[in-house]
Amino acid sequence: MGKRIKKLKKIRLHREGTNTLFVVLITFIVIGALLLYFGGNNWLFKGFIALAAIIYAIIVNFFRCPIRYFPSEDTDKIVVAPADGRIVVIEEVEENDYFHEKRLMISIFMSPFNVHANWFPVDGKVKSVHHFKGNYHKAWLPKASEENEHADVMITTPEGVDVLCRQIAGAIARRIVTYAEENEECYIDEHLGFIKLGSRVDVYLPIGTEVCVKMGQRTTGNQTIIAKLA
């Protein structure tokens, strides 16, 4: 596929948070102005300002979007973490929706305090994109992978290997945004999508893939190598 194309724009806050941050800011300003106008207790106004600042900082932190580029041009057979979070599953499973055979599944759980942008785990071409409605079990439960609302992005690497990346909604996160489009070329440095609040991303790889992470390990999206294809 040649030299990777780095199309990711240099942004500090993710575009998915623009409207939310604006609405919350205006709401806090209005409430603060009303408290000040009606002569509320000084401690009440100061307390509100302090609480509003903390809440707004948490929301900003949630929608932050670090500028990241994979540190090497050599991405052949490399699988990077599609999300910030913690490794909660490394196991062989029967995948019957697409492959109808055993696959190695590596799962990353994202807490509400993690960056929630998702990256493509491999370079390649998007083979298919599907969205499925479902339940909202806690994201770390095994049944969440199949029963929860999720979006599946199938990617074919330059070597012809199919890799499935699944964005999964959780008990709190109920909005999955997927930017991947069928038949487009994709690169590790690009955003695959975004999931609001805590959730999970699964990657399905061929049996025989070398695992480069361990259970409980922290991952950084687009930086941590989680596996190497055979």
Image (tube, rainbow, N blue to C red):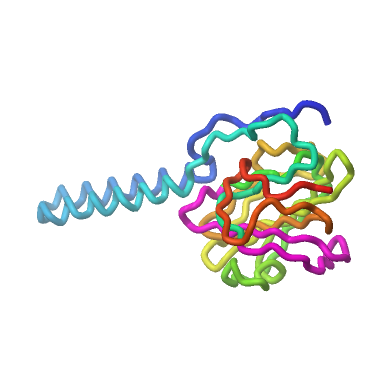
Regarding residue 28, the answer to whether it shows in the image is: yes
Closest to the observer, 78 or 37 = 78
Image quarter of residue 26: top left
Residues drawn in magenta? 88-116
- Return the x and y of residue 96 as percentages of the image width and height: 84, 67
Taking 193 as reference, is 103 above or below it? below
Which corner quadrant holds the N terminus?
Answer: top right
Taking 25 as reference, is 11 above or below it? above
What residue is rendered at 66% in x and 37% in y? Answer: 190
Q: Tell whether 216 sits left or right of 151.
A: left
* Predominant SS along the magenta part: strand
What residue is rendered at 66% in x and 59% in y? Answer: 107
Count of all numbered marks drawn on residues in the image: 0
Regarding residue 179, the answer to whether it shows in the image is: no
Q: Tell whether 163 sits left or right of 83.
A: right
Q: Tell whether 13 sits left or right of 194.
A: left
- Return the x and y of residue 230 as percentages of the image width and height: 84, 48
**Residue 109 painted magenta:** yes
What residue is rendered at 86% in x and 47% in y? Answer: 161
